Image: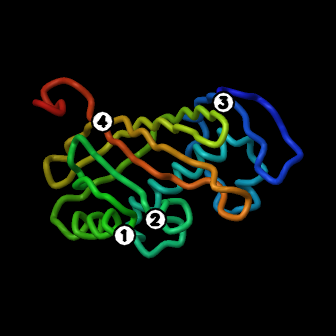
Amino acid sequence: MGREASHSDNLSEPRSTSSSDTSSSLGAAPVNEDELASLPISHRLERMTVLLFQTVNARDFDSPILSRYLSPTFRADDIDRFIPSSGCRHSYIDELRKASSDDQMYDHQITSTCAEVDEDQAVVWATLRTTISPYDNLVQETVSRLQWVFKGKRIGWVCTEHRGLRGGGELGALG
């Protein structure tokens, strides 16, 4: 095993190793499976990551995007504690619902993404600029690390883990 840039003729999806920065085209995320399937794997995973964050921003917790792209065993650990740690997709969505019913409003805007694909696993890093209301529109930058796994052609890529890391300074994780 290791990094491999190849296209195979077997039943699994071709794998590649690549990294890209898509900050200039984040707002143009394809919204249907055909458009996503036409993209290189790294770009596809970046777009899927953007779609996940857009869905959460829209508070559309019943969206099929969440059940399609998040593994049933999805784990989340946000060091900044916007959302408490969770051990499965269902509890994560429940925590999102609870957090969205509070007076606080979180608006996460992805400013850049970078994907590394290695065999049937990938990591997408996303830099976010988060505005928190009603706290005088406090703005905070964070980095999110999403782990993706390829589950075969029928299921495709699913996100198995999200880890949020807060930036430094006075608002750092220990600050």
Horizontal side of 124 relative to 170 (left or right) equals: right
Mark 2 nearby-residue class (10 Å; few <14, some 14–19, many ≥20): some
Dot 4 amino acid type = Leu
Residue receiving disc 1? 90
Q: Disc 3 to disc 1, how far (Cα)?
A: 32 Å
Q: Is there a contact, CB below 8 Å, between mark 3 and mark 2?
A: no
Dot label at residue 30: none
Of callouts 4 and 3, the N-terminal one: 3
Q: Residue at coordinates 41% horizontally, 46% vertically from top-left?
A: 109
Give residue 95's position: percent from left, percent from top: 26, 65
Mark 2 or 4 closer to N-term? 2
Q: At x 55% / y 34%, what residue is drawn?
A: 23
Q: Are marks 1 and 2 in contact (CB under 8 Å)?
A: yes
Above/below status of 37 relative to 2: below
Position of 3 with respect to 34 (left or right) is left
Crowdedness near tag 3: few (<14), some (14–19) or many (≥20) residues, C-alpha within 10 Å: few
Tag 3 and tag 1, C-beta contact below 8 Å: no
Furthest toward the bottom, the residue is: 62
Q: Which badge, 1 or 2, comes first in the chain's sequence?
A: 2
Where does label 4 land, which residue? 165
Mark 4 or mark 1: which comes first in sequence?
1
**Residue at the spot of label 3:** 1
Q: Quadrant of residue 130?
A: top left
Give amino acid for label 3: Met
